[in-house]
């Protein structure tokens, strides 16, 4: 079977990870520019100041997308570029996205725009960032400006990318910008404010949008799949575990408020007296109608039922391969997680990110044979197709990432691109996987093999 008609085949990237032209001397300073300045934070002591220089090379990059046959491209707008001081629109910032969006449309590529992929203006961090409830008002200003300018041309929106990461890693563990390590009580306030920003953005986008406007968020958490797919108790254990709040790694702690207008009971239970007092009007604001459930899926943990009503994590089976980032390769995540999300939230699902980090580099002919990514793509897409065949409404898939880019605290040491980037010369080289993805898109997924030597490992 092919994928459904009109299935959206895309690739994704984010502003700070590819654009460059940010930081010192540019008039654009985000929290990531500031964070990268701190000693020994970024693995290779780099930053996104130059990144893939997409800011200057966007037109050529769009041509690479056209050559790939992409139907859609998920980009993010940099809040810091558009509103460097958090208050006023920068015309050159807007103009960059004007040109980029026009170029995409000219290439018949549908833009999916993420409003927040982690680059808040530093000026707003100085006012407390997400800890300050005023952040909602600032975000509204930004979204209003963007919606006004782009809503005729952009119909597909992703409000926020992985709030779990910028709130919990940003304010609790300190491993992401702004790098703060605060008591959980404060972090949970930030959590709530981030959700308010999402709700406020949806309201504004709807006001400027029309019947064709599609809005969602990129939600993620830790995913769980059953150890034994033939054991209904294991399946039930995995289903429950996906939506239980435990530490910050919970999808339901974000998706339930956005979709049901309430934090899950397990969220209150886990955090106890540290949870903020929540005004019902806030929950109304957060729970705006969404058109799809957007999610980023890389891998999942394996769990099983213990027989006494509990569940436990088990090691993935022996032979489970791992990526160059040492993440387990668990294709079954691509079937089980969208299935669980669809059952619970009853919204069409779009995979907004999926991909793998490789260690490949150009050979003597200058070619990049990333067999691992090709294999990964066939396996994950094969499982996605099975989910679709079983009745899950999945509308699209975005490969992460278009280009090798700035991988946050790992700097340029982790490569997720379909297109290799030489970070000294900025030379782009489409990898083997880019050719394969092009054929997959061209055949609407008919050539997805689905199985490999790993077939026996499914469920891992
Ligand atoms: C983020 C991307 C990141 C990717 C790979 C996702 O969590 O949205 O920005 O590059 O994972 O680590």
Image (cartoon, rainbow, N blue to C red):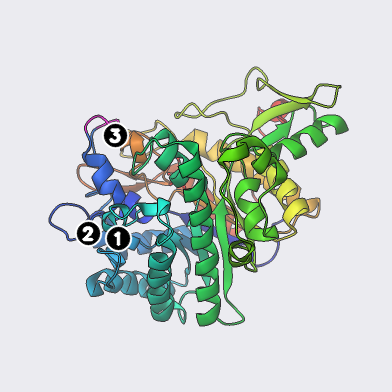
Q: Secondary structure at mark 1?
A: helix
Judge whether 246 appears above or below 201 on screen: above
Indicate which disc residue 28 carries: 2
Query: In the picture shown, does residue 155 fall above or below 427?
Result: below
Q: Ligand 1, what quadrant? A: top left
The residue beneath circle 3 is 42
Question: Counting residues from the N terminus, which is met first, the one under dot 2 or under dot 1?
Answer: 2
Q: Earlier in the sequence, mark 2 or mark 3?
A: 2
Between residues 62 and 1, which one lies in front from this camera angle?
Answer: 62
Badge 2 local density, few (<14 within 10 Å), some, or many (20+)?
many
Can residue 40 be found in the magenta stretch? yes
Instruction: Identify the image quadrant of the C terminus.
Output: top right
The mark found on residue 370 in the picture is: none
Where residue 418 appears, as percent x and y from the top left, is: 43, 46
Instruction: Give the residues drawn in magenta, as a range.
Output: 39-44
The residue at the point 64 percent across, 38 percent down is 223
State the quadrant of the N terminus: bottom right
The percent coordinates of residue 379 (x first, y second) are 63, 39
Residue 193 visible in the displayed image? yes
Of residue 229 and residue 313, the one placed in the foreground of this image is: 313
* C-beta proximity under 8 Å, tags 2 and 1: yes
For residue 146: magenta?
A: no
Q: Which residue is mark 1?
A: 80
Q: Is residue 232 left or right of residue 290?
A: right
Q: Tell me how far mark 2 sits from mark 3, CA to CA.
A: 20 Å
> Crowdedness of circle 3 by 10 Å Cα count: few (<14), some, many (20+)?
many
Mark nearest the camera among 1 and 3 is 1
- Spatial separation of the CA atoms under disc 2 and disc 1: 6 Å
Up/down of 10 relative to 285, above or below:
above
The reply, left or right, for residue 4 in relation to residue 27 is right
Q: Which element is circle 3 on?
A: loop
């Amino acid at each position: 079977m092919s994928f459904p008609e009109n299935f959206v085949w895309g690739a994704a990237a984010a502003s700070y990870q590819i654009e460059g032209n940010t930081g010192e001397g540019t008039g654009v300073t985000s929290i990531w520019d500031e964070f990268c300045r701190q000693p020994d934070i970024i693995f290779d002591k780099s930053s996104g100041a130059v990144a893939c220089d997409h800011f200057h090379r966007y037109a050529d990059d769009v041509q690479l997308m056209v050559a790939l046959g992409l139907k859609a491209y998920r980009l993010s707008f940099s809040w810091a570029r558009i509103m460097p001081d958090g208050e006023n629109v920068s015309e050159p910032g807007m103009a960059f996205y004007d040109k980029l969006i026009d170029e995409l449309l000219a290439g018949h590529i549908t833009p999916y725009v993420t409003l927040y992929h982690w680059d808040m203006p530093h000026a707003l961090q100085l006012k407390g960032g997400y800890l300050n409830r005023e952040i909602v008002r600032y975000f509204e200003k930004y979204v209003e400006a963007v919606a006004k300018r782009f809503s005729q041309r952009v119909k597909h929106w992703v409000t926020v990318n992985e709030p779990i990461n910028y709130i919990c890693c940003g304010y609790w563990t300190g491993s992401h910008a702004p790098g703060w390590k605060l008591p959980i009580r404060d972090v949970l306030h930030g959590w709530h404010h981030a959700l308010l920003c999402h709700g406020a953005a949806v309201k504004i986008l709807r006001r400027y949008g029309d019947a064709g406007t599609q809005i969602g968020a990129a939600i993620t958490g830790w995913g769980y799949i059953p150890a034994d797919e033939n054991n209904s108790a294991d399946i039930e254990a995995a289903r429950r575990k996906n939506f239980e709040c435990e530490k910050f790694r919970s999808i339901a702690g974000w998706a339930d408020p956005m979709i049901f207008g309430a934090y899950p009971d397990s969220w209150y239970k886990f955090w106890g007296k540290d949870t903020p007092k929540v005004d019902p009007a806030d929950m109304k604001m957060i729970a705006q109608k969404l058109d799809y459930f957007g999610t980023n899926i890389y891998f999942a943990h394996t769990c099983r039922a213990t027989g006494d009503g509990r569940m436990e994590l088990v090691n993935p089976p022996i032979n489970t391969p791992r990526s160059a980032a040492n993440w387990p390769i668990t294709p079954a995540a691509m079937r089980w997680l969208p299935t669980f999300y669809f059952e619970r939230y009853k919204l069409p699902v779009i995979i907004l990110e999926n991909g793998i980090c490789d260690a490949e580099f150009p050979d003597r002919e200058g070619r990049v044979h990333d067999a691992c990514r090709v294999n990964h793509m066939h396996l994950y897409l094969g499982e996605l197709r099975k989910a679709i065949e079983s009745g899950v409404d999945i509308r699209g898939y975005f490969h992460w990432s278009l280009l090798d880019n700035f991988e946050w605290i790992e700097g340029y040491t982790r490569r997720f691109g379909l297109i290799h980037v030489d970070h000294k010369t900025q030379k782009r080289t489409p990898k083997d996987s880019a050719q394969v993805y092009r054929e997959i898109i061209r055949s609407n997924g008919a050539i997805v093999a689905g199985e490999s030597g790993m077939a026996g490992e499914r469920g891992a």
